[in-house]
Amino acid sequence: MQTLMVAVVSLFVLSIALAAYAFVGYPLLTFVLAAIARRRVAKAPIEPTVTFIISAYNEERVIADKIAETLQLDYPRDKLEIIVASDGSTDRTDEIVRSFADQGVRLVRTEGRLGKTATLNAAVAASTGEIIVCSDATSRYNRGAIRELVANFADPQVGGVCGRVLYEYGNSMLARGFKLYQAFVVRQRMNESRFGQQTQLSGAIHAIRREDYVPCPPEISTEEWNALHIALHGRRSVYEPDATALEESRHRPAAEFRSRVRMALQCFAFTWYSLRHGLRRTTLLYHFQNISGKVIRWLLPFNLAVLLVTSAILAAYSAAAMAVALVLWSAAALALLGIAFPKAGGKVPGLPLLSFFAIVMCAFAVAWFKLWFGRQAASWEPERGV
């Protein structure tokens, strides 16, 4: 019995420590490192050839506006190649893209619903630019975004650049929670870029040197994959807040949950690859950032489950454990109530963020379960704005 209690206490303390590090310790550490160990980027107004790839699946509603907007971006037209990568679209997306052929817009289509990653691989293989810019069909770039991205490549140590994604949030409880979460993420990414590098590049807006692009397995997201291979090539990925892409946030918990499960499946599949290859061939700094900012966060569902169970067991023996148990179980109950009754929950301070966090943790747990049973990420189904 004593041995069992020692194990329970050890798990309880370890779970608290990991949660505290994920939510407080590492974010604070990024602030400190950004202040004392800042690495400058030698930016300059260069104009390399650029391939701008728009990933699309059944985007007839927005694709014409996206192409027209891309044609108006502030970059020399003779140095800008525009490709729409269509993942087997079944609506009028491809037809609309072909109508821009006389303006130099190319269509690269894959058959069989291979997924966003495989379609992007095909588009890159068909491209010619020195720099590859990846965009979603719904992402609205600021006019100078390409110039802001490529200016970072004047520094030979830079292999990838991640732009800043802005959102039209709306007033739903989910959107309000996501807004708070996004503010936290953006600040952490800016700090990481200042002292180290990005371990993830936004699918909506990022650029990579052609020589650093490695075809990505279809079950893995290019966002983490590209950042890893840039590090494997001895370069770093940086964050460029002046290159922006405007998106519309999701408003329904079910849509957010489905999207998070799909993204998590790709991230978790990447985890094993990054740990296996990154340890041997990347810098300790990259691996420290990857584990601290990604892997530990992806394992949080298990960590929080252990914390809930052990705190409940120890509540009968310790006032501190009882306090932790009351806080955790109350927070879980409130988060579920907020999801079930979003209109009422939106009026409670802090509940939108708590409910959004609960959706993400549940999605992570489901993704781990699916991965355990051999499931891969489903085909890409855009759900922005629903």
Image (cartoon, helix red, strand yellow):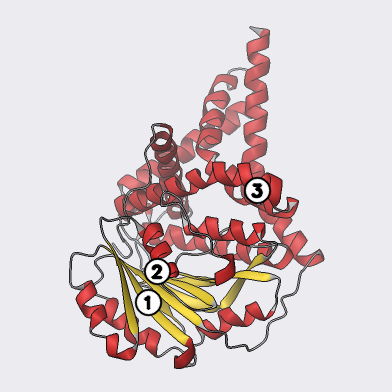
Q: Badge 2: how crowded within 10 Å, few (<14), some, or many (20+)?
A: many
Q: Earlier in the sequence, mark 2 or mark 1?
A: 1
Q: Residue furthest left?
A: 91
Residue 219: percent from left, percent from top: 42, 48
What is the three-letter code of the residue carrying label 2? Ala
Q: Quadrant of residue 171?
A: bottom left
Q: Amino acid at mark 3?
A: Gly
Q: How many marks?
A: 3
Q: Is residue 15 above or below residue 348?
A: above
2 and 3 marks in contact (CB < 8 Å): no
**Residue 163 higher or lower than 197, as above or below:** below
Label 2, label 1: how far apart the Cα atoms are: 7 Å
Residue 83 marker: 1
Counting residues from the start of the chain, the first of labels 2 and 3 encountered is 2
Q: Which mark is residue 278?
A: 3
Q: Which badge, 3 or 1, is on the more N-terminal residue?
A: 1
Residue at 62% in and 88% down: 46
Q: Position of residue 356 (x, y in %)?
A: 43, 51
Q: Disc 2 marks which residue?
A: 123
Q: Which mark is residue 3?
A: none
| Dot 3 and dot 1 residues touching (CB under 8 Å) | no
Residue drawn where x is 42% and y is 62% of the image:
121
What is the spatial separation of the Cα atoms under label 2 and label 3, in whole angstroms?
A: 26 Å
Which corner quadrant holds the C terminus?
A: bottom left
Quadrant hosting residue 77 = bottom left
At label 1, the amino acid type is Ile
Q: In the depicted view, which residue is nearer to us: 235 or 19? A: 235
State if disc 1 and disc 2 touch (CB < 8 Å).
Answer: yes
Task: Classify 129 as above or below 253.
Answer: below
- Other-residue count near label 3 (Cα within 10 Å), few / some / many at <14 / 14–19 / ≥20: many
| Label 3: which secondary element | helix
